Amino acid sequence: MNLVPWPRSGYDAGMWPLETLIVAGMRRRVLSGISGTILELGAGTGANLRFYGPSCRVVALEPDRRRLQAALRRRVSCTLVPVQASADRLPFRNDTFASVVASLLFCCLPEPLMALEEVRRVLTPGGTLLLVEHTRGDRGPGRLATRTLSGPWLRLSGGCHLDRDTVATVREAGLQVIETSSRLCGIFRTIVARRV
């Protein structure tokens, strides 16, 4: 597999420490073994693309044209289909994808429930949602840090919410959560859910 060296952009450079220490391993675990046609929401600059194999056809959805272009410059072993669109209005028919993937996205969306309802609509029955997110800490220092820093971080980051309970929102959208795992007191979390 040919991989373009990380980082590729200012965002990637800023994320490099977290990516190296925590997030890349979570991405690798949640995406291991995935194949077929996959919808990736908020593909960004393509941080997940290195984890897809040649049996994957990835529909990379991203509203920001510059980030999508950065993703397209990566050398990957999967087939890549770029789509410039937003996660809360997916331009696909019902029951289209067996797998939907997103990483570090639902913290930034203005209406995460609306986007997850769209995910449910485009997933096939029995289809799987695979997420790597940062969420509200679930205990001790993680809970305290996300609660304390949430307001200032929201203003500094331009819309990233540190304290969202994404697992609860996934359930509220009508998806069945089948597995979660967390790092750093629940601040980083993988979520696997299914459309039933």
Image (cartoon, rainbow, N blue to C red):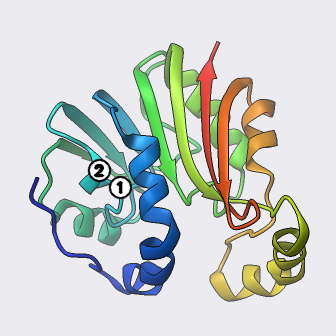
Q: Residue under circle 2?
A: 51
Amino acid type indicated by mark 2: Phe
Q: Residues within 10 Å of mark 1 (few under 14, many from 20)?
A: some
Q: Which residue in the structure is indicated by mark 1?
A: 48
Question: Any mark on residue 107, and which?
Answer: none
Q: Are marks 2 and 1 in contact (CB under 8 Å)?
A: yes
Q: Residue at x 39, y 42 (%)?
A: 31
Q: Residue at x 49, y 64 (%)?
A: 23
Number of numbered callouts drawn = 2
Above or below 60: residue 33: above
Question: Up-down: is 53 above or below 118?
Answer: below
Residue at disc 2, secondary structure? helix
- Side (left or right) of 136 relative to 104: right
Q: Position of residue 113 (x, y in %)?
A: 73, 42
Q: Position of residue 63 (x, y in %)?
A: 43, 58
**Amino acid bearing label 1:** Asn
For the C terminus, the image quarter is: top right
Q: Is residue 159 left or right of residue 99?
A: right
Residue at 81% x, 32% y is 172
Q: Nearer the viewer, mark 2 or mark 1?
A: 2
State the residue in front, 169 or 130: 130
Q: Name the one closer to the observer, 76 or 105.
A: 76
Q: Quadrant of residue 50?
A: bottom left
In the rendered structure, the answer to whether residue 14 lies left or right of residue 106 reads left
